[in-house]
Amino acid sequence: MQRILSSQLTRHVGGTVKIAGWIHRRRLLKSVAFLIVRDAAGLTQVVVTDAAVRATVELLPEETVVEVTGTVVANATAPAGVELTDPTVRPLGPPAVPPPFDLYRPALTATLPTQLDHAPVALRHPTRSAALRVSAAAVAGFRAALDARDFVEIHTPKVVGSSTESGANVFALDWFGRPAYLAQSPQFYKQLMVGVFERVYEVGPVFRAEPHDTVRHLAQYTSLDAELGFVADHRDVMAVLRDTLAVMLGTVADRAGGAVSALGLDLPEVPAQIPAVHFTEALTIAGAPADEPDLAPAHERALGEWARAEHGSEFLFVTGYPMAKRPFYTHPDPARPAYSNGFDLLFRGVELVTGGQRLHRYDDYLTALAARGEPVEPYAGYVDAFRHGMPPHGGFAIGLERFVARVVGAANVREVTAFPRDLHRLTP
């Protein structure tokens, strides 16, 4: 007899089936015992009345892995409306050592540090695993959206030979006796690959050696990067980003509908046209000084509230950030050179995406580096490609964990990260 999952039981009412999973909850009453068995698809209620089977069950604490064979009976009060009766229960391993918190309760009561210390078992809790299902569906949607637009998935190095993109905020390592660094982003590589495929994307880890200890930062996170050639300006990039987010959220609804329901989520709608404000207007809306060079978290929250109130939108583009706060490869606004053809996308009052149009002429790169007092040599392998013809292009990067945290309403990105790496944590 082949094992089936809990989600398949309703197809077998009246029949005998075999399931397997973890003992999620055990209730030993006077005349009957109940087992709730958890598998990848959900929960199954098992009703035990036989004395010999009950004796076996009494020796098996929560989280013990078992195999159960029984008859499927309809019961509207049981999970999924069915339960197993007349079961045989066979342990598939030794009795489990109970974890330091109860996984059968509706919410984990342990503190987040305790959950992270015991991540291999904390992630078994339905709310924690549901967030990871949302994450997986979001990535699938990202790929599907860009595949449909003829983007090509690429895989770029995560170990690089120079710390050029953002100076000191990199992790150094020894590469066979030579200095090397963990890559902060695939930015340079994805631009170069526009010269090969025109449209590319990547899903991969990035590393930031920034001493942030906040609820929105990780030292390693997953970046969803895209770059496209032959754009008119950054607005073409924003249009692709809007459509990508719509497909991502649609895929979450389709592929992770059970997780969405379990978490009680109200998935946001992506407007056909996401509202956009220029950086200078954003400062006014947020009540920030006119000479502020960037948006603080409080400003982002104020802008998120404004977008909901004025446009009914959970999303807001802020365009035209000052060139002084954008990387050297950012294309300036031809009409206002002090401002960029770049943007951030705020989602529920938090910066989610950074993107924009890039420089594509070799001479412009030389000028941009000289203006910042930077030598060309460390960038030679990157900048030299622009001598050989590159189209106008641009792109964006979505922080996956931050996106999922905003979707599920998590207060901390670590709640939606399987094994987070931050200022303090390298284990488990």
Image (cartoon, rainbow, N blue to C red):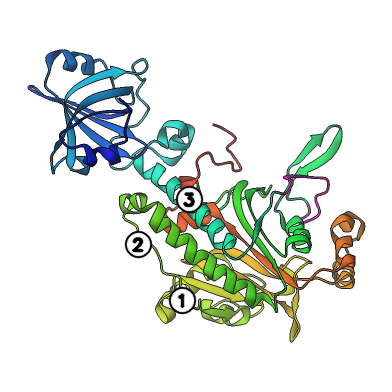
- Nearer the camera: disc 2 or disc 1: 2
Q: Which mark is residue 266?
A: 2
The mark nearer the N terminus, 3 or 1, is 3
- The quarter of the image holding the N terminus is top left
Density class for disc 1 (Cα within 10 Å; few <14, some 14-19, many ≥20) is many
Instruction: Provide the residue span drawn in magenta.
Output: 156-167
Residue at label 1? 307
Residue at label 3? 135
Q: Which three-letter amino acid code belongs to the residue tagged 1?
A: Ala
Q: Nearer the viewer, residue 10 or 158?
A: 10
Q: Is residue 408 left or right of residue 204?
A: left
Residue 419 locus on image (x, y percent) = 53, 38
Residue placed at 8% from the left, 22% from the top? 30
- Res. 412 in view: no
Location of residue 289 by image quarter: bottom right
Residue placed at 22% from the left, 41% from the top? 10
Q: Nearer the viewer, residue 219 or 200?
A: 200
User: Secondary structure beneath disc 2?
Assistant: loop
Q: Disc 3 and disc 2: Cα gap in Å?
A: 16 Å
Q: Is residue 127 left or right of residue 218?
A: left
Q: Is residue 233 left or right of residue 263?
A: right
- The quarter of the image holding the C terminus is top right
Q: Which three-letter amino acid code belongs to the residue tagged 2?
A: Asp
